[in-house]
Image (tube, helix red, strand yellow):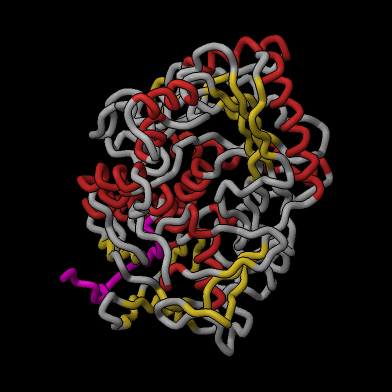
Amino acid sequence: MADRSPSARADVCVVGAGPAGAIVAARLAEIGHDVVVLDAGPRFDLDDRTDRLDAHLRPGVDGRWGMGGERDAYASSGSRDYPLNAARVKGVGGSTLHWQGMVMRLHERDFELHSRHGVGTDWPIDYADLRPHYAEAERELGVAGADDNPFAPPREEPFPLPAFPPSHSDAIFAEACESLGLPIHSVPNARNSEPHGGASACVGYGTCKPVCPSGAKYTAERHVARAEAAGARVVDRAPVQRLEHSDERIEAAVYATPEGTEHRQEARAVVLACGGVENVRLLLLSASDAHPDGLANSSGLVGRYFMDHCFAGVGGRIDRPTRQNHVGFNTSECHALYDATDPLPGVKLEFLNYAGPAPVIEALHADDWGDSLLEDLRASYGTHLAVGGLVEQFPDAENRITLDHSATDDHGNPVPDVHWSVGSETRAAIERANEVQRAILDELGAEVDWVVGPDETGPAFHHMGTTRMGADPTESVVGPDCRAHDCDNLWIAGSSVFPTGGAMNPTLTIAALSCRLADRLDGWL
């Protein structure tokens, strides 16, 4: 029975309550602006998280975040199948409801890829421009970390929270990596290493992805709560259908209610913050006589340069205890392969604390119980380890998001169509990553069980690049301040504005750009 009628007055309408939209909304509301947030999905009660964890663990049950069905229909027409719904969440909190929580800054080379290596493109801003906003973002998310990464870009202050200690398996990997000249360092995490922001320290459920029942890991719900406390209005289950506009300005966001009623939310400015796929879809659904190819698309680039991170990994077993799955997130990494002068895409090595089967899941899915199950668990648990890695994709105009007009969602709109492929440069980088990963396991005397190489690679579900940032309106969708070139009062938040993606998890950069966008939009208002 929630009131989903439009607000009579709004300075800003934010579309999407994930990390980008929630940070923008909170900061603008706290300054004193009238803010309305529209999100396509529901609110998820923190008290229900243990039930969601139970659904994740049990066989034949998948009630985690309600994705799927007609509402979330999509197509995948690229040379590689892209399982879009495997990691999307429509709801207040967005993808942070089930993310792993690792937050590192892009390196300086990521902003200057073309200038340094002659590949990809350059951002219209550099690391120095974003550096103070990275510090803001770390405070906003409550990041736990240590300044022990010899490859990290320069920083200006300590992390807000102390780093998590290395895991038992990290210590095993450290021995091998030292022999191979590969420095191991801590991983910045957006989860509490000590009580912070009204939430407890991490209590070790080990199920960070897809469910953190304790609330110690950051979700955008924290910023939603801050926005509402400052007077913002957040409307859930209000999917925006289109943006009504004149030649150069957005007049209203048209959204639907669960009962099927359409409303118009007028605002002085609109911020699109619904991800690298739905941002594109909404712009294309808003085509008009003035913008026949879609809103903000005079460059023809809306939807193009879709990027993700590809996974590379090698796993196996060693003849010593590894304590697998005691920690549900990474505590150590290696960036030694990232800033090399070789123009191959960057690689970030990850030492996986969650390698191998988890005994609880194994037991719940077992066909036999009693001594037979105990024997199986003893045989499968405790000696697994793995080295993973994220591999950069260079921007490619043929990797893109379009509309599939042959299928529709629950409101009769065409569904998004993902065209995704893996180029030769990324394949070569995956092969290089596998070589180093194998060398680490060989140094440990491990028996290799599996390899994820270029033929088996899949996405990390980091949707980037589909409304790219640039100074030239003919070669980009938004300017350096994230405002659309074609629409005076339209701003786009999130990783869809990334010109390049690097190989670092994108959420800290999303947060930093959102802090910067809020500052620019406040000045514009």
Outermost residue toward the bottom in this view: 289
* Residue 151: % across, % down: 65, 24
For image coordinates 73% across by 25% down, the residue present is: 436
Q: Is residue 127 left or right of residue 160?
A: right
How would you classify the magenta stretch by its main secondary structure?
loop
Residue 358: in magenta span? no
Q: Is residue 500 left or right of residue 240?
A: right
Decide: is 108 above or below 321.
below
Residue 14: in magenta span? yes
The number of numbered badges drawn on the structure is 0
Q: Is residue 457 visible?
A: yes
Q: Is residue 28 visible?
A: no
Residue nearer the viewer, 158 or 70: 70
Q: Is residue 78 left or right of residue 233?
A: right
Q: Which residues are magenta?
A: 1-17
Outermost residue toward the left in this view: 1
Is the N terminus in the top left, top right, bottom left or bottom right quadrant?
bottom left
For image coordinates 57% across by 82% down, the residue present is: 406
Residue nearer the viewer, 55 or 47: 55
* Residue 476: % across, % down: 67, 63
Decide: is 156 above or below 445.
below
Decide: is 258 above or below 432.
below
* Residue 454: % across, % down: 73, 44
Report which quarter residue 429 is drawn in. Answer: top right
Report which quarter residue 364 is drawn in. Answer: top left
* Residue 234: % across, % down: 28, 62
For image coordinates 37% across by 35% down, the residue present is: 368
Is the C terminus in the top left, top right, bottom left or bottom right quadrant?
bottom left
For image coordinates 48% across by 70% down, the residue present is: 73
